[in-house]
Amino acid sequence: MFTPLDAYLQLPCAPHPWVVEKLIPVGGLVNVFGKPKTGKSFFALGLAQAIINGEADWEGYPIQQHGPVAYLQIDTPREEWHSRLGKLHFHPHANRTLWMADMWQVPEFPFNILNPNRTEVRWLKESLAVIKPILTIIDTLREVHGGDENDSTTMRNVLAELVGACRPSAIMLLSHARKDSILTTNGEEDLMDQGRGSSYVAGRMDVVIKLTPKRMVFKGRATGQTVETIAQDPNTGLIVIEPGPNDGAVNHELRSVLADLGPGASQRAVAHELAKRTRTSQSTAIRRYNAYRKELDQTRAALAASPGA
């Protein structure tokens, strides 16, 4: 039944609109796409790690809700996943942990969310009802159904079944990019039509994120298009955001911290104070501090090597 406005505004809802600000809305749909080997799974794992570990932010993007994360991956052998997960640092809490399922744990393989007997739908819904995740990651979208990914009706049904089985969890769908880019009338790449398959998928999403080896580009219903320079951590494989022009305010705050603490301050002390002043996690603060020091060292080396130095 419909509800009058005054009563509607009194209905229960989450205290914050985001799980991760600008990237994952509470109960929303997110599509992360890119060409093979661009770090999509590592991007998702990094977000999951920050959400589960109670971090204040992921790479500077505030985390407003912490809790368990469910990860369904039926695209990669278990042995490879053991290797990936072994490099990460999860700190399970009583009500926060990472829940994994792979191709050997699903009730039917190949997995097909459109199976007429609804075996996969029931399994997914019943499994998540126990876990109660705030985020469910599907890796990859192509591997959870047997339909035509270019057909809008098929993809509508796929997404409807996934949402029905996962709600109220937010859902992150990992998928591949088109082989060719679609351009807008002014010759620029159209982010909303670069994911593989039916354009219905992009239209249904709350946030669309494209990954390349060096860039993360995202756009959402409540946010404009944003571009970040990224890299993969050589030790863990996780995606990190490289400091750029937008970090000017952070660098100003960092210089202020260094001036206040004095030249003998330890990295930990600087990171702790910077994290407090910029409302970010200490891991983000440490990375920014190290990047700042590297930039200073490079500048000094360039000056020393210049004529007349």
Image (cartoon, rainbow, N blue to C red):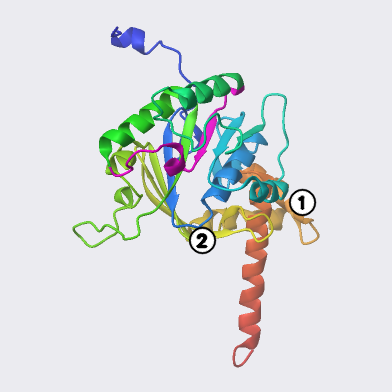
Q: Distance of mark 2 from mark 1, alpha carbons? A: 23 Å
In this view, the residue in front, 37 or 75, is 75
Q: Which residue is mark 1?
A: 268
State whether residue 117 appears in this view: yes
Q: Is residue 128 above or below residue 155?
A: above
Where residue 158 sits in the image (x, y, percent)? Answer: 37, 32
State whether residue 167 appears in this view: no
Q: Is residue 214 above or below residue 74?
A: below
Q: Which residue is mark 2?
A: 244
Residue type marked 2: Gly
The quarter of the image holding the N terminus is top left
Where residue 63 sits in the image (x, y, percent)? Answer: 56, 36
State the residue at coordinates (65%, 43%): 281
State the residue at coordinates (59%, 92%): 307
SS of the residue under disc 2 = loop
Q: Is residue 99 magenta?
A: no
